[in-house]
Image (cartoon, helix red, strand yellow):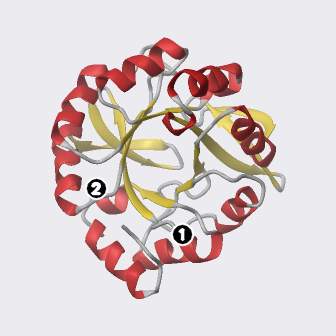
Amino acid sequence: MLAKRIIPCLDVDDGRVKKGVNFVNLTDVGDPTEISAEYQRQGADELVFLDITATNEHRKTMADIVESVSSQVFMPLTIGGGVHDVADIQRLLKAGADKVAINSAAVSDPELITKGAEKFGNQCIVVAIDVQKTAGKYLVHTHGGKKATDIDAIEWAKEVVKRGAGELLITSMDKDGTKNGFDIELYQAINKVVNVPIIASGGAGKVEDFTEVFEKADVDGALAASVFHFGELSINDVKQAVRKAGVVVR
């Protein structure tokens, strides 16, 4: 049985870490390099770093910040935002990313997943899927959650894995920033149809939420932002609680 991962997420906008609720009303949290170093000290298993406005502003993810963060931390880094082609993936891996997350570009050009996996290996390609439930159906959103599509999220998860995604980062937009717990049904549904690691994102509010998503949805990692950024929980708090419940964590 693989050990579960506890993963803080840094949503970066204009060089600063920001956090909102349901993808809007962003609040400034601080400097990404300083925050990353703190998570290194706390014992985070990985770090996800998303340039949340890069796609909408038609620019690349800021490689200088990625380099700065990767020089401070020694855990795996997943970097996403503004990735449009194989050259972008290569640039981020060179800057210090271990894995690159693609979302909007994967939807507009699914072949990018295959090309990236063939060139760099499946383990480097994470497909991020932002999901909102509409009329009882889980639908994919792109461009930082701003553009709705009619793509079924469960079917899309199956397709991206077929195309070479080595991991899925699934964010419930309905739960994002609410601290009401993860969307267990969503992760259960996706876990039934794919055989790659799933990172659950959106809704963490207390230590029990992490235990629940590991036990009930059997995801491989649980990601959170607000509760860690604002000191409501520490990585250690979560790991201790999850271990106490009998879940193996790193």
> In this image, 73 relative to 164: left or right?
left
Can you say which quadrant of the picture contains the C terminus? bottom left
Distance from the alpha carbon under mark 2 to that under mark 1? 17 Å
Is 176 displayed left or right of 135 in the figure? left
The residue located at (52%, 39%) in the rendering is: 123
Q: Nearer the viewer, residue 137 or 186?
A: 186
Between residues 47 and 226, which one lies in front from this camera angle?
A: 47
Q: Tag count in the figure?
A: 2
Asked which secondary structure carries label 2, the reply is helix
Which residue lies at the image location 49% right of the left edge and 34% below the top edge? 124
Marked residue nearer the N-terminal end (2 or 1)? 1
Which residue is rendered at x = 72% and y = 52% of the image? 194
Residue at image mark 1: 181
Q: In this view, does 85 lie to the left or right of 184?
A: left
Q: Residue 218: where, in percent of width, then height?
A: 61, 69
Say which quarter of the image contains residue 148.
Answer: top right
Q: Which amino acid does label 1 sit on?
A: Gly
Q: Name the residue under label 2.
A: 229
**Element class at badge 1:** loop
Q: Is residue 206 above or below residue 5?
A: below
Q: What residue type is labelled 2?
A: His
Residue at position x 51%, y 62% in the image = 203
- Locate residue 220, reporting x and y percent: 53, 61
Decide: few, some or many residues near mark 2? Use Cα within 10 Å; few <14, some 14-19, many ≥20.
Answer: many
x and y, in percent, of residue 72 in the image: 16, 40
* Above or below: residue 166 compared with residue 228: above
Instruction: Identify the disc placed on residue 140.
Output: none
User: In this rendering, is residue 161 above or below 181?
Assistant: above
